[in-house]
Image: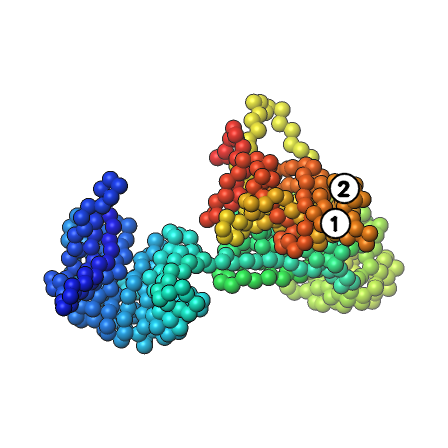
């Protein structure tokens, strides 16, 4: 069914515009009928916009009861085969002193229209406005502003379904005639994320730190800091309405985490997130106080919370292996202090295993009374260790030896000193832990399942069939642009960078020495043979690329080259480049 406006012209007669409808018949249309909305056919109506069920129609009319010249009205019916009920004016939130015309009901329920009323401030002439329904009423109208609106008349907007693109009419300056048709699209939001990683103790940059990015959409990307300590994630990796968790790690340092999000951002933005890494200390780290009953080794529930910080550290640093060391004071007990301290250390290890820490990362060691404590800071000890205890100070640098304890004047001070020696601490043994692969001897009929998501690459549509995405060339991550009409090209600047990094040499050029001028610059259209190029999980080896100037992004791929990676399709709405693998079994 088609609905349209017709304005008959009869000499010496005033004929109002009316809405007509016609039904599709074969390759043509049936004769149109007038859509009766008012009893008085002299009332002008036009610019119909209907919902999918054709049971609600928005239109413009100069019918009595309006607020100015022409207003936006709505009429409804229970079925498309029945006549419409009496039209209703949309009211003063939309209609004003001038003309409101060209309503357009979008698929998402928002309403667009044009107005030149004083209560809708604009840029001149008819401007296009948008309103969203809030309950049973339409909300405040929003002017689409420049460049959609101009000093002329801008009207009759339509969208291509859910896409942020479409057409509208305007008589603005620079057109071809009076009212011209213009196309438009809203560029996608573009985000990047970068930062510098530094050493917390020296404030110097850290080169080669691994930065892992995990998105709320399931994407996982990794980068490492360069010679300036900088990591970067580009516009094809940081997407709108997505939250990201970053994990930064480097051998010899504790890992750290951070979060960034593009949710709620309405403008493109370069996100900055710097990190500092804390060096793994060469000396043991004393855990918060854990007290045991005399000659006992059971870990009491009230002290289990003291280990939460250690558990968090282990979870955030899955590759470190630690030694849990337990120390006693020097006073004799029925069992040896060495045995007691070993059992106390093991009780801590057992608790950490219960909390999910891999046993291979934990080593229990009892030192008895062999290693008196040296205080790394001023300490206040409560003795007895309860709410009735009194504070006893001990200075930084004090070594709690038997000789020192004997020199103390009161029994309470001596007990507080012994208490300082009864401690549990941890130290990092190494940071290269790799869990053993699980052995399942009962596994039979193993089926290798190909996850279709592995064959999907996020893209950034660029219009006219082009898009940008991420690739890895000779181990170097970079953006590429797809253009169906082009073969593979690489920018002069990127080729120079790859030479500097020794990712390529002169032997990788088809012409060898002949690819270079006397000053070392590239000859025009030099051919570089890339050893390995990866897009998603797809790999291509020994692919030829022409070195050209002025490329941004630095790689341009044509359809002939992309086809070599496998059969593919592009879904611009979902921003996906999809490679098809025959016989793949989807994950469920």
Question: Looking at the image, what colour scheme do you see?
Answer: rainbow
In the image shown, does 221 or 480 lie closer to the viewer? 480
Q: Position of residue 107 (x, y in %)?
A: 34, 53
Q: Position of residue 478 (x, y in %)?
A: 65, 50
In the image shown, does 121 or 43 lie closer to the viewer? 43
Residue at 71% from the left image edge and 54% from the top image edge = 493
Q: Earlier in the sequence, mark 1 or mark 2?
A: 2
Left or right, residue 439 beside residue 377: left
Q: How far separated are the C-alphas under marks 1 and 2?
A: 10 Å
Residue at 51% from the left image edge and 34% from the top image edge = 587
Residue 587 seen: yes
Disc 1, SS: loop
Left or right, residue 568 beside residue 171: right
In the image shown, does 297 or 127 lie closer to the viewer? 127
Q: Position of residue 158 (x, y in %)?
A: 35, 57
Q: Which mark is residue 214?
A: none
In the image shown, does 92 or 174 lie closer to the viewer? 174
**Disc 1: CA contacts within 10 A as few (<14), some (14-19) or many (>=20):** some
Location of residue 231 with respect to 514 vertically, above or below: below
The image quadrant of residue 191 is: bottom right
Circle 2 is placed at which residue position?
A: 511
- Furthest toward the left, the residue is 39
Q: Which mark is residue 523?
A: 1
Location of residue 3 with respect to 97 vertically, above or below: above
Residue 501 seen: no
- Furthest toward the bottom, the residue is 118
Location of residue 178 with respect to 23 vertically, above or below: below
């Amino acid at each position: 069914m088609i609905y349209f406006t017709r304005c008959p012209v009869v000499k010496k007669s005033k004929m109002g515009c009316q809405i007509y409808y016609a039904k599709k018949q074969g390759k043509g249309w049936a004769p149109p009928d007038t859509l009766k909305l008012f009893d008085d056919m002299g009332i002008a109506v036009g610019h119909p916009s209907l919902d999918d069920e054709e049971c609600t129609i928005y239109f413009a009319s100069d019918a009595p009861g309006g607020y100015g010249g022409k207003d936006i009205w709505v009429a409804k019916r229970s079925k498309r085969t029945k006549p419409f009920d009496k039209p209703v004016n949309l009211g003063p939130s939309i209609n004003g002193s001038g003309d409101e015309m060209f309503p357009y009901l979008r698929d998402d329920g928002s309403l667009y229209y044009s107005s030149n009323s004083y209560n809708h401030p604009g840029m001149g002439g008819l401007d296009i406005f948008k309103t969203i329904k809030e309950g049973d009423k339409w909300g405040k109208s929003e002017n689409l502003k420049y460049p959609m609106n101009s000093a002329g008349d801008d009207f009759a907007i339509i969208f291509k379904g859910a896409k942020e693109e479409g057409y509208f009419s305007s008589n603005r300056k620079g057109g071809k005639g009076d009212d011209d048709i213009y196309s438009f699209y809203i560029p996608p939001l573009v985000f990047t994320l970068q930062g510098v990683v530094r050493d917390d103790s020296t404030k110097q940059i850290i080169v080669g730190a691994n930065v892992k990015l995990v998105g709320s959409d399931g994407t996982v990307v990794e980068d490492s800091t360069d010679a300036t300590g900088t990591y970067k994630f580009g516009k094809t990796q940081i997407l709108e309405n997505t939250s990201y968790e970053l994990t930064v790690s480097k051998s010899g340092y504790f890992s750290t985490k951070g979060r960034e999000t593009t949710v709620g951002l309405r403008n493109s933005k370069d996100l900055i997130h710097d990190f500092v890494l804390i060096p793994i200390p060469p000396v043991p780290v004393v855990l918060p106080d854990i007290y045991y009953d005399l000659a006992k080794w059971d870990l009491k529930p009230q002290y289990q919370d003291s280990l939460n910080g250690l558990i968090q550290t282990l979870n955030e640093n899955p590759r470190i292996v630690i030694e849990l060391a337990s120390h006693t004071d020097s006073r004799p007990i029925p069992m040896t202090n060495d045995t007691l301290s070993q059992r106390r250390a093991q009780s801590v290890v057992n608790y950490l295993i219960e909390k999910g820490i891999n046993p291979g990362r934990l080593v229990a060691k009892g030192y008895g009374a062999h290693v008196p404590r040296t205080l790394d800071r001023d300490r206040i000890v409560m003795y007895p260790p309860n709410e009735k205890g009194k504070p006893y100070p001990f200075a930084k640098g004090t070594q709690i030896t038997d000789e020192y304890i004997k020199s103390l004047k009161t029994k309470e001070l001596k007990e507080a000193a012994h208490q300082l020696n009864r401690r549990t601490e941890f130290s990092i043994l190494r940071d290269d832990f790799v869990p053993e692969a699980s052995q399942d001897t009962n596994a039979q009929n193993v089926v290798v399942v190909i996850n279709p998501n592995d064959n999907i690459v996020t893209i950034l549509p660029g219009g006219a069939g082009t898009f940008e995405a991420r690739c890895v060339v000779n181990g170097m991550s970079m953006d590429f642009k797809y253009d169906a009409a082009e073969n593979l090209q690489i920018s002069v600047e990127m080729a120079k960078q790859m030479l500097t990094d020794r990712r390529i040499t002169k032997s990788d050029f088809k012409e060898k020495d002949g690819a270079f001028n006397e000053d070392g610059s590239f000859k025009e259209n030099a051919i570089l043979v890339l050893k390995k190029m990866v897009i998603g999980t797809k790999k291509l080896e020994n692919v030829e690329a022409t070195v050209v100037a002025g490329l941004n992004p630095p790689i341009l791929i044509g359809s002939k080259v992309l086809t070599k990676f496998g059969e593919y399709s592009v879904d611009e709405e979902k921003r996906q480049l999809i490679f098809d693998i025959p016989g793949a079994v989807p994950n469920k």
